[in-house]
Image: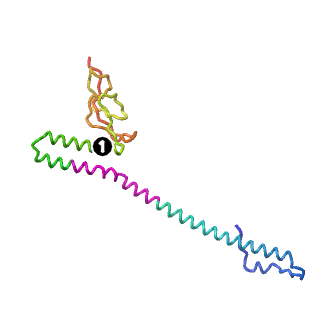
Amino acid sequence: MIDEPQAGAAESVPEQSHSSTGGDPAGESVATLRQQLERAHAEREATQQKWLMALADLDTYRRRVRKEAEEARRFAVLPLAEDLLPALDNLHRALEAARSATDVAQLVQGVQMVIRQFDDVLVKHQVTAIESVGRPFDPNLHQALQQQPSADHPPMTVLAEYQRGYQMHDRVIRPSTVVVAAPPAN
């Protein structure tokens, strides 16, 4: 770092007398050095101001990005919620219809339509049901509640599903709770 000249330092440099033939080269070089030093100080000051402005801009940017990330986390499920509301509305309508319905078949058909609507919303958001019945037991996808002897199915085959499991992409949200085939008792 270049130190600024102290007050009086310039005065301590002896002034050279200029001859009438064009001046003293040593005096001109001191003046040139002083001008260069003043320019260097001015450049340093300008660079320091730019650096401080860049730091302030970076701090502002970090705060803005942090706030945007927090907002994104807070409202990440908003699209899912918006897509589920019509299915929920239809479920409420089905409940109202059930209170005064005389045709159970129509009621069942209406509830099946609402279930399809829920399934479609989940698929739209990459949430898929785990297929279990008839498949080999996979501890990563299934949670066995019990084993049941079966001569019709190979051991460790899923026989029944108590609760459907779901996954998003390759991550299990909830495993399927299942009954698994065991070798028949002899």
Identify the image quadrant of residue 127. Answer: top left
Q: Nearer the viewer, residue 24 or 185?
A: 24
The quadrant of the picture occupied by the N terminus is bottom right
Identify the image quadrant of residue 115. Answer: top left
Residue 20: horizontal and vertical position, in percent?
89, 83
Circle 1 crowding by C-alpha within 10 Å: few under 14, some 14–19, many from 20: some
Residue 37: horizontal and vertical position, in percent?
73, 72
Q: Residue at x 82, y 76 (%)?
A: 28
Which residue in the rendered view is the most extreme toward the top? 186
83 falls in the magenta region: yes
Q: Which residues are magenta?
A: 65-90
Residue under pointer 1 = 120
33 falls in the magenta region: no
Does residue 149 lie above or below 1 as drawn?
Answer: above
Residue 5: horizontal and vertical position, in percent?
73, 75
How many numbered marks appear?
A: 1
Amino acid at circle 1: Asp
Q: Main SS type for the magenta part?
A: helix
Residue 103 is left or right of residue 132, and the answer is left
Q: Residue at x 73, y 77 (%)?
A: 6
Residue 184: horizontal and vertical position, in percent?
27, 20
Q: Nearer the viewer, residue 39 or 121?
A: 121
- Which color scheme does this rendered protein use? rainbow
Does residue 46 lie above or below 12 as drawn?
Answer: above
Q: Residue at x 27, y 37 (%)?
A: 163
Q: Residue at x 26, y 42 (%)?
A: 116
The quadrant of the picture occupied by the C terminus is top left
Does residue 120 lie above or below 8 as drawn?
Answer: above
